[in-house]
Amino acid sequence: KAGVTQTPRYLIKTRGQQVTLSCSPISGHRSVSWYQQTPGQGLQFLFEYFSETQRNKGNFPGRFSGRQFSNSRSEMNVSTLELGDSALYLCASSPAGRRAEAFFGQGTRLTVV
Amino acid sequence: GENVEQHPSTLSVQEGDSAVIKCTYSDSASNYFPWYKQELGKRPQLIIDIRSNVGEKKDQRIAVTLNKTAKHFSLHITETQPEDSAVYFCAATASGGGADGLTFGKGTHLIIQP
């Protein structure tokens, strides 16, 4: 069974731009969560989607948003990029009935210059 | 919300020795405690987890213990090997309705000295 797939793997963007990251969950997984990983703050929860609905949201500004499609694939968008948004963005999917068990993708490394 | 503290931040042990990493959590509603291993440049991988109705769980050289009263849980790795070198993260969440994602500790960089 294929794992969680995230695209692209690397991105370089300019301050003020916006960016969209994509995540394909493990087949059959309907819950997708997003995390930001930085050396200073560690792994922080962004949001969780299930059946195309945002179920939970972490403590991030409104510039961070996401969505989920009917095939459970998810995207996250960051608008008006800031230098501090440079991070590894990790997507995780969870199996039905075991919502807390998160299986991570390789992540997208975003660099804002 | 939940707060997870993890210690130590760096742990260096001789190959073959045991390693112990400790975490504390603050929210008594948390009932699911996974541990992740992240090698340099790779994804976090779930290596073991424990639920609040269990006090200890083992999987070969890895074990996790949970003390609900004290709100702490620990990862034990015995007979350490070079491939155990990585950053280890503990996490906590309430796995039922209302979960707000995994709250992670800051990580422990485990170094296995040959």
Image: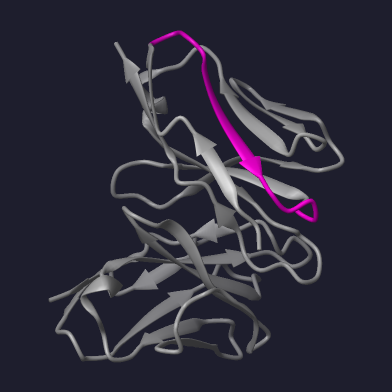
Between A28 and A60, the one nearer to me in the picture? A60
Give the quarter of the figure containing the N terminus of chain A: bottom right
Can residue A109 be seen here?
Answer: no
x, y percentage for residue A3?
A: 49, 61
Compared to residue A78, the image places residue A88 above or below, namely above
| Residue drawn 63% across the image and 45% down it | B34
Q: Residue at x 31, y 53 (%)?
A: A39
Q: x, y (%) of residue B36?
A: 52, 44
The quadrant of the picture occupied by the C terminus of chain A is: bottom left
Q: Is residue B37 above or below residue A41?
A: above
The colour scheme applied to this rendered structure is one colour
**Extent of the magenta region:** B15-30
Asked whether B26 falls inside the magenta stretch, the response is yes
Q: Is residue B2 magenta?
A: no
The answer to which image quadrant residue A97 occupies is bottom right
Q: Is residue B44 above or below residue A64?
A: above
x%, y% of residue B16? 44, 8
- Tell me which corner region of the image, top left, top right, bottom left or bottom right, holds residue B14: top left
Displayed quadrant of residue B63: top right
For the image, the number of numbered tags is 0
| Left or right: where B92 falls relative to A64 | right
In the picture as drawn, the residue positioned furthest to the right comes out as: B53
Q: Position of residue A84 (x, y in %)?
A: 26, 72
Residue plotted at (40% across, 52% down):
B43
Q: Residue at x 46, y 87 (%)?
A: A65
The correct choice, above or below, for B4 with respect to B10 in the image is: below
Q: Is residue A77 visible?
A: yes
